[in-house]
Amino acid sequence: MSSLTSAFAAELAKPALILFGAVEIVLPGATVRLLDGAGTATFGGRTFVGRDATFGVLGGVSDFADGIEDQAPSLTLTLLPPGNSAMAAFAAATAQGSAVSIWVGAMDAVTGQVIADPDLIFVGETDVPTQKVRAGERELELTVISIFDRFLETDEGERLNTGFHQSIWAGETGLEFISFVRDQPIWGADAPQSVLVGTGASPNGDAARGAFV
C-alpha cells in the first residue's frame, strides 16, 4: 500500500509538476531547514528556505546506500555555507547524532502551495562532517546514517549493578541493596550453549531423556 496521500499521488500523475526536496537537521543550537532550490515551502508546521544565512544552500543529496552485514543505510548531504560557522556547528561534540529528516514533495504550479502531504523518505542522524575548501569554493559534506544504526550497537559495558541500572533508569533503586543474585542472568554477553546430551538407558530400564554434563 502506498504511503502517499491521494492528493500527492494525483499530482505525481500529471505530465508537468513541480517537485522539491526538503531537508531538516535538528542541531543543539539551531534547526536547519533547506530546500533543493530557491524560494520557500511550508508544511507540517515547518518552513524550508532555499538559503540560510549560516548554513548556505543545499548543494546535493547522494543516492541512498543500503547497508550490508553490520552497516546501516547511509547518504551524504552537501551544503554550500558562506563561512566557517556551519562547520563549527556540525563539528561540536553535542551535534553528533543530530536528527535528520528528508522529504520529497510537490507544489501547485499555479498557487505555489505545497500539495499535502510531502513523503518522508529518510530519517537518520548526523555522523561525520567534512569541510572542503578550494579557490572560491567551500563545501561541507555531511555523512548521515539511518536510525537503524542503533540496532547495531553492542551490549559491551553493560553491568548488572545499581550504577549501570540507574544510568539507564535514573532514580530506579531496584538494585541498590542487592548483594547477591541466586539465579545469575546472562548480562552483557551471549548466553552459553546448552550442554544437555542424551545418555542412553536409565537404571530402572526406561530410556533416559537426557542429563546435564
Image (cartoon, rainbow, N blue to C red):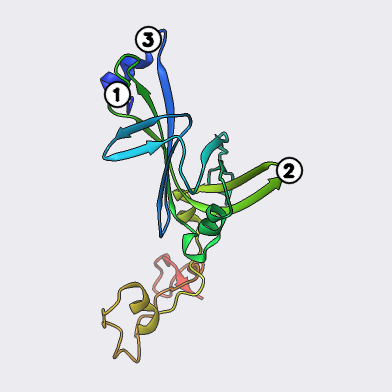
Tag 3, which secondary structure?
Answer: loop
Say which amino acid is labelled 2.
Ala
Residue 88 image-quadrant placement: bottom right
First reached walking from the N terminus: tag 2 or tag 3:
3
Q: Where in the figure is residue 89, as x and y percent of width and height?
A: 51, 58
How packed is label 3: few (under 14 Cα within 10 Å), some, or many (20 or more)? few
In this picture, residue 95 sits left or right of residue 185: right
Mark closer to the observer (1, 3): 1
Say which amino acid is labelled 1.
Gln
Residue that protrudes farthest toward the top in the picture: 15
Residue identifier under label 2: 135
Residue identifier under label 1: 113
In this picture, residue 193 sits left or right of residue 109: right
How packed is label 2: few (under 14 Cα within 10 Å), some, or many (20 or more)? few
Q: Where in the figure is residue 57, as x and y percent of width and height?
A: 51, 38
Seen from the viewer's position, the closer of residues 31 and 65 is 31
Q: Which mark is residue 130?
A: none
Name the residue at 35% across, 90% down: 180
Is disc 2 in contact with disc 3, using a CB cutoff of under 8 Å?
Answer: no
Give me the C-alpha separation between circle 1 and circle 2. Answer: 39 Å
